[in-house]
Amino acid sequence: MTTTSTTSTPLDAVRTKHVGLAITALALGGFAIGTTEFVTMGLLPEIATGIHSSIPRTGHIISAYALGVVVGAPVIVSLGARLPRRALAIGLVLALGIGNAATALAHGYTQVMVARFVAGLPHGAYFGVASLIAASLVPPERRGRAVSGVMLGLSVATVIGVPASTWLGQDLGWRSAYWAVLGIAVLTAVSLLVFVPRTAGHPDATVRGELQALRRPQVLFALAAGMVGFGGIFAMYSYVAPLVTDVGGMSRSAIPSFLLAYGIGSVLGAWLAGRLADWNVERSVLAGFLATIVVLVLIVLLAGTPIALWVLVGVVGLLGSVVAINLQLRLMHAAGDAQMLGAALNHSALNVANGLGAWLGSVVIEAGHGYRAPSLVGAGLAGLGFIVFGVGLLPKFQPEGSRRADR
């Protein structure tokens, strides 16, 4: 089995005196994305009432956003690889703002669906270019921490951005939450312009050349591992509310504290992921999948104990960040010269995982197996992700140059 670290990724260094501020500015974009991605779930009843639709039907707007992520990541990155990276990041975050403004202005189910699809388009591409910029600002041995710093914005959004915007939407109307995201997007664009240095694009990049990365077995295995393995986390998290109330025996008022536990775990996981990545990316992914299996099985066994369930949900959040960030770094390395595409595709994979985990969870619930069952399904998905990722590390699936170096 081959191993790599972030130090092996070829990347042009960019100098700046404000590395911390630059990474914070890039993370602010992640904060805006995380807020808009998850606030819809918290405001679903208000949105349904506002557009005169049922809650189940309105829930399709969450899928519309996810579809935008899946479609937008490879298309936008492939078309924009030649563009200066800072300019591309600013354009993407402003596009995110436009999508949220369109959501706030939309009337009726169809308009909101289209607006959420548009808002999802820049999601993966932004994280792709932001990760590449962050990695270029620091020495090779600190690139894992730099990329995790960008992803930290997404985790912080689950703790601060989503609860705050949900409260805002409930108090001032659901449209106000999306106007708030527009404000964050504009602030991000200004911060990127001020603190992030100009960075050149890839002058020789072509759409065909970028998409060639999808022919690399190590890229395909990493993507498949993310789509399947990360689905294990979403299988549990999608049904955390009934798990808390129906299995844990707690009132609905306890649900926010479990969402907070997941968010806190995600933030800690983003911090830990960077340090693990600078040690070894591949082993971090494998360890993350294994730990996820154990924790999800423990949830099946201990869901009736409130304190244990709260801690375990938090640990799931931590492991989610560790796996997601290290999968992104693995894809950046495996994609060769198409590093930005590799980073962006990770978010397409995670959104596929979201849908897969939630769907399989619904299947076992509707089959009468109860609300513990999705966590058991999740453990199986995480195990399958571990196997797929491990197979992708076998020497026969590595580039010829890498295999010769290993010998």
Image (spheres, helix red, strand yellow):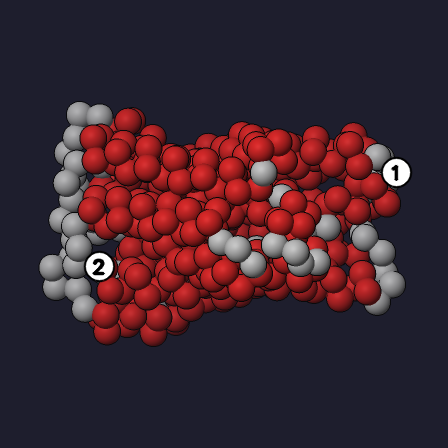
Q: Relative to 333, is 313 above or below?
A: above
For marks 1 and 2, give the CA distance: 51 Å
Please state if 114 lies on the left or on the right of 77 as rendered: right
Task: Tell me where residue 292 appears, x and y as whole percent.
Answer: 63, 48
Instruction: Inspect this view and state whether residue 331 appears.
Output: no
Please state if 24 lies on the left or on the right of 295 as rendered: left
Front in this rendered view, residue 206 or 29:
29
In the image, farthest residue toward the left: 203
Residue tagged 2: 81
Residue tagged 1: 249
The quarter of the picture where the C terminus appears is bottom left
Task: Tell me where residue 325 appears, x and y as whole percent.
Answer: 44, 46
Looking at the rendering, which quadrant does residue 151 occupy?
top left
Three-letter code, disc 2: Ala
Mark 1 packing: few (<14 Cα in 10 Å), some, or many (20+)?
some
The quarter of the picture where the N terminus appears is bottom left
Task: Tell me where residue 207 appears, x and y as whole percent.
Answer: 23, 70
Please state if 76 lies on the left or on the right of 2 as rendered: left
Question: Which residue is located at x 23 percent, y 73 percent?
Answer: 208
Looking at the rendering, which quadrant does residue 90 occupy?
top left
